[in-house]
Image (cartoon, rainbow, N blue to C red):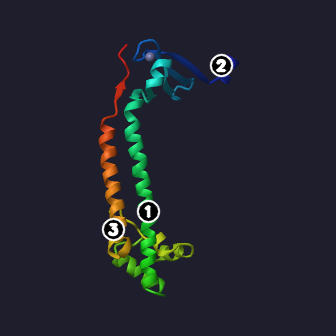
Amino acid sequence: MDRKRAVSRVELVSWRETSCLCGRGQVTRHVASTDYVFGGADVTFSLDCAECSKLWRFQHKSFTLRSSEVEATALYAKWNAACDAIRAVSPRIVDAHFTTLGKISKKAEMAELTRLGLNPGTYRSYLDARHTKSPGQIAFLHDDCEGVFAIADAEASTLRELVRIRDELRRGWEAAGKRVVRRGLPSS
Ligand SMILES: [Zn+2]
């Protein structure tokens, strides 16, 4: 038996898959195969063209025009920040509400969260979480902030505005995503 072959089980082979979009470079296929019959092969592609790489992002056998995704990427980041802001405000509102209720039992806290539609799970898990967290940090918070608005008082308008901005950003991000320009591999 060829000893050398038995040791080097992974074989790396690369070849030109097709031309790039401008035609001056190429898309290269890289295959890492083992000599096991059922080992399969790991296939990846790379874009080898300095010009196309400047304009296009290449991933999973498709090209994305970098300039066309700037808007969607920026809106996505803003949408994410708006989601974070809501996630920061909502627990504070819940905790402020519990402060107004005064000292109540854990059982009563759980009952109140259930009444508000913010029930986080079982009473057992609530008690466990309550060792280190406040009711607002444990509460199940809905995307539409249902249940939180009812107790938001002075912060209701702030929360409503945050939700409006977040939803508007999401619509903007989705619309911008449809304007992203993508291309598949050229046929030759
Ligand atoms: Zn090119």
Residue flagged by tag 3: what amino acid is it?
Answer: Ser
Q: Position of residue 140 (x, y in %)?
A: 41, 68
- Of pointers 3 and 2, the one earlier in the residue sequence: 2
From the viewer's side, name the closer residue of 124 and 52: 52
- Distance from Cα at disc 3 to Cα at disc 1: 16 Å
**Residue labelled 3 has its Cβ within 8 Å of some atom of ligand 1:** no
Dot 1 corresponds to which residue?
Answer: 87
- Of pointers 3 and 1, the one earlier in the residue sequence: 1
Numbered label attached to residue 157:
3
Quadrant for the N terminus in the image: top right
Numbered label attached to residue 5:
2
Q: Secondary structure at mark 1?
A: helix
Q: Pointer 3 and pointer 2: residues touching (CB < 8 Å)?
A: no
Q: Is residue 40 left or right of residue 171?
A: right
Q: Secondary structure at mark 3?
A: helix
Q: Position of residue 108 (x, y in %)?
A: 42, 84
Q: Position of residue 24 (x, y in %)?
A: 45, 12
Decide: few, some or many residues near mark 2? Use Cα within 10 Å; few <14, some 14-19, many ≥20: few
Quadrant for the C terminus in the image: top left
Q: Is residue 90 above or below residue 60?
A: below
Q: Position of residue 95 (x, y in %)?
A: 46, 76
Q: Pointer 1 and pointer 2: residues touching (CB < 8 Å)?
A: no
Residue flagged by tag 1: what amino acid is it?
Answer: Arg
Residue shown at 42% from the left, 26% from the top: 61
Q: Secondary structure at mark 2?
A: helix
Residue shown at 42% from the left, 72% from the top: 93
Q: Nearer the viewer, mark 3 or mark 1?
A: 3
Q: Is residue 70 visible?
A: yes
